[in-house]
Amino acid sequence: MELELTLEGMNLGIDERRPLVIAGPCSAETEEQVMETARQLSHNGIKIFRAGVWKPRTKPGGFEGKGAEALPWLQRVKAETGMLLATEVATPEHVETALKAGIDILWIGARTTANPFSVQAIADALKGTDVPVLVKNPVNPDIELWTGALLRINNAGIRRLGAIHRGFSSVDSKLYRNPPMWHIPIELKRRFPSLTIITDPSHMGGRRDLVAPLAQQAMDLGMDGLMIEAHCNPDCAWSDANQQVLPEVLDFILDRLVVRESVEITESISQLRKQIDELDNQLMDLLTKRMRVSREIAEYKKLHNMTVVQTTRYSEILDKRAAQGVLCGMNPDFVKKVYEAIHSESVRQQIEYMNK
Ligand code: PEP
Ligand code: MN
């Protein structure tokens, strides 16, 4: 796939050393809020302004965006600051309305990317245009669905295509609103080395204080740019208030960002190592969950006066996993060793729990 996001030879970062940055409020709320935020961002060198006009909300009754009413405000931003405009589209009507209003970059939101029917309808509406399109990852961690959406848009003739990594829904994430699962965008980059991947630390972290560390992590992993939510009065934002930052805070964050230079030289090995690190993180996470369930079992056993070790169950686990290991190309003795170690720690934790 041939993908680029350079517009008319413009450098879209704050300066040549910086990544491409797209910033602006989660939603366009009022003309004043849009203009005030845009002026401050532009003053700090931001060249692409984002604002949601049509907002996908989990439940009805929330603020669903101002719709077409907000488009003249964005046009005013462009006229007064010269910034390029980006907004989310979810239907063919949005595409048509946004293009008529002169929006420069369209993005497809996470909820929409998850639905191939919607993506195809958008792709059909894009045929014959050459607007740059950014595809956010689907809400679920499915790289094939993300790739499929990029291909649908690409097949519609869109060449200036990029991806936005905003993290993935998870039921029990404590720290992040949408855990990044970095191995997924890294794998996407491995599959499509020329694909521009922009990180959205705002939706990933869901919290102001996580924007800077996530943005730095994105740079360390060689991502190409950032999309960050900024608002002139974040605490009073009509959507995503917790994660939006003041334009001056964004400036501070971008100023301190360390952009690594020698990414290309060792890119493949370091990307593979990052994948390993990320997978190890997931392994630890899974082990933690497994131990937690095991302690719940201990509670049941205690209540019913059962012994900790039930040998039939233990042999069943070892045999089943060893056989599965063979199917996965692993030595069954290795798998047995791993499960013996897990089981022994699990037993230790159960005994500890039952004697509490
Ligand atoms: C947004 O960018 O404001 C948005 C709704 O994001 P996402 O689709 O990633 O949830
Ligand atoms: Mn948002």
Image: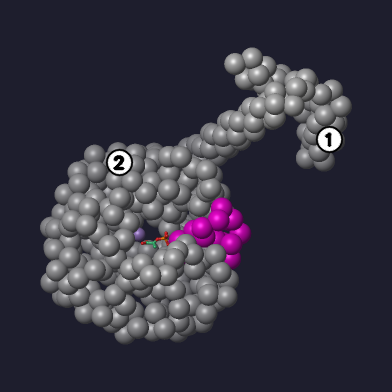
Q: Is residue 5 left or right of residue 13?
A: right
**Residue 143 lies in the magenta stretch:** yes
| Residue 162 percent across, percent down from the top left | 43, 62
Residue occupying image coordinates x 42% and y 70%: 60
Q: Percent x, y for residue 129?
A: 41, 81
Q: Residues within 10 Å of mark 1 (few under 14, many from 20)?
A: few
Q: Position of residue 170 (x, y in %)?
A: 52, 48
Find the magenta span and give its range.
135-148
In the image, residue 96 sits, relative to residue 24, either above or below, namely below
Judging by the rendered image, the residue that carries numbered circle 1 is: 320
**Which residue corresponds to the image point at 14% horizontal and 69% vertical from the top-left?**
32
Q: Could you tell me which secondary element the residue under label 2 belongs to?
A: helix
Q: Quadrant of ligand 2?
A: bottom left
Judged left or right of residue 88, residue 49 is left
Residue sitting at 38 percent across and 84 percent down?
A: 96
Q: Nearer the viewer, residue 288 or 161?
A: 288
